[in-house]
Amino acid sequence: MNLSSLPFQPLPLLRLLAFLALVLSLSAEEPAAFLKSAKRIVFLGDSITNDGRYISVIETRLRQEGISPLPEMLNLGLPSEGCTGLTEPGHPFPRPNVHERLDRVLSRMHPDVVVACYGINDGIYHPFSEDRFAAFRSGMLELVEKVHRSGAMLVLMTPPPFDPLPMAKQGKLAKLNAPKFAWTDIYEDYDSDVLARYADWVSSLYEPVEMVIDWHGPVNAHLAKQRETNPDYVMSGDGIHVDEVGQILLAEPILQSWGFPAGSSKVNQELYALVNERQQLLHSAWLTYTGHTRPGMKPGMQIQDASVAAAEIETRINGFIASHHRGSDTFESIVEKIPATERPQRLFNGFNLTGWKGDRDYWSVTDGMIRGANSGNVPSSTYLFTNGTHRNFRLLLEVKQTMSPRHSTMHSAVAALGEQITDTGDNPFGFRGPLLMFCHDWGIWDAHRRNRIEPAGHPTTLNIDAEHQGDWNLVEFLAAGDRIRCAANGVEVFDFTDAPEMLKASSIGLQLHANGKPQEFHFRGLVLCAEPGDALVSVVKP
């Protein structure tokens, strides 16, 4: 493994080892299984968690991925809180201690997973002290014991860093010999001298707890990277409370550790706004219900009333998600008629290309559609493949080809029942086998083997009256045994039976043809049935 390629560099040794242990111990299936098994995930922490936008990013991503059943994710972050009971002189009130409320949170909320982050308040913004460090260790170990005693899984976050630059610009940093230290007068080396040690120690807990995820390293690495070109770059006005960019950055290590690829914190903003609205509503309600000692917190709604209001937002969320992976009303009416025994599944979540593999220079998602497009030369046909393989299937999709004086009218196709190959131009997303063609040419082309096989002997492109050129086309393919059928906009196009040795289970791919001219196709719907019946469901019967 090339350590320089890891996303959280540079890290102190203990945190690097903890991160590597986590990465090496998780299989690709485990994070998904963990998320599907948990019914409720509760987040505990201080004002950074109280802000909660990183939690909304995580929940939005899980919803986009179609995690079902979705665990309820509840934010119980409380401003000013720590795990030690320590308070710096001059603080306007005693800092809340999570242990004052932890038993109530666990007994009233019954979480399956607790995600917790403490430390930034527990050093009380002073220079390092062995006594304060011992109090922090004791408080964290007590938290571990209580959470485990409740039967919940525990995920610990290292404390994020303190960025001294904003306070330095305001002349508010306190030197080692300063007469006082507080959240308004923070020790200038609080991050490197205190929080880095706290973070290293939390990282060492990856054996007694189920998961440790580093925040301290990634945030500091991001700040250092940005300041290579912008020395004044900050994500906070006080070095502690990060802005929206910082909250998104906090979501990223959690998402990666939970099995999602780098960049997972990039989410649909409309969906995020709805999720965040629901999160904030439930946050204040549950804080009030479970109770706390911090003054100045506005009471939330009664849990019963908050649940009703949250359900209304949930309805809006579900409607928004459904609109993104749906096809047209006609398409959806056909899908509704498919028997459940055919096991219909959505191949596209409407938000990203999870579940697909292909060259991202050509394939993207826009406005709830898969887009395949090129502006320069495509040396060999390239495909966006499903991760899974299929032998017998029904595939329903809607496709629209962009037509203009500068766009090629070259066909697209569904690649199936063949094999993925490396093609001309070192293209790893090539294909050998049947291409089920559509848009400006219809039939079957057997790529890299027999060329056109349906209609047999047809010398040129095959246009059909049923095609809506330059507009949406509802296309159905049905592959059962050795027989392959196609319908376009309710009209059967071909019915072909092939030699069985020429067909095998493979990924299904969407084609962007080799071309020197620009091409653009949009796809939506994309419903596949693993146990298809023997009739074309989209064909209009007389």
Image (tube, grey):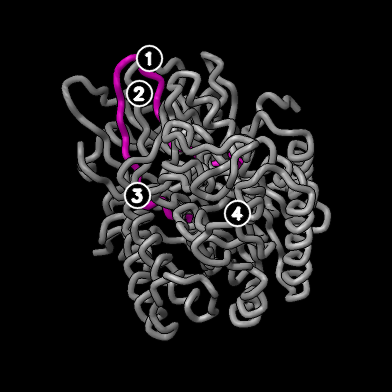
Residue 95 found in image quarter: bottom right
| Residue 377's disc number | 1
The residue positioned 71% from the left and 51% from the top of the image is: 212
The residue positioned 63% from the left and 68% from the top of the image is: 98
Eye-nearest disc, 3 or 2: 3
Badge 3 amino acid:
Gln
| Residue 121's disc number | 4
User: Position of 442 compared to 423: left or right?
Assistant: left
**Dot 2, how many residues are within 10 Å of its Cα: few (below 14), some (14-19), or many (20+)?**
many
Closer to the chain start, of discs 3 and 2, is 3
Residue 410, horizontal then vertical, whole percent: 31, 25
Q: CA distance from mark 3 to mark 1?
A: 33 Å
Find numbered disc 4 in the image and state the secondary structure of the residue it sits on: loop
Q: Main secondary structure of the magenta part?
A: strand
The residue positioned 53% from the left and 69% from the top of the image is: 72
Residue 155, horizontal then vertical, whole percent: 68, 58
Q: CA distance from mark 1 to mark 2?
A: 7 Å
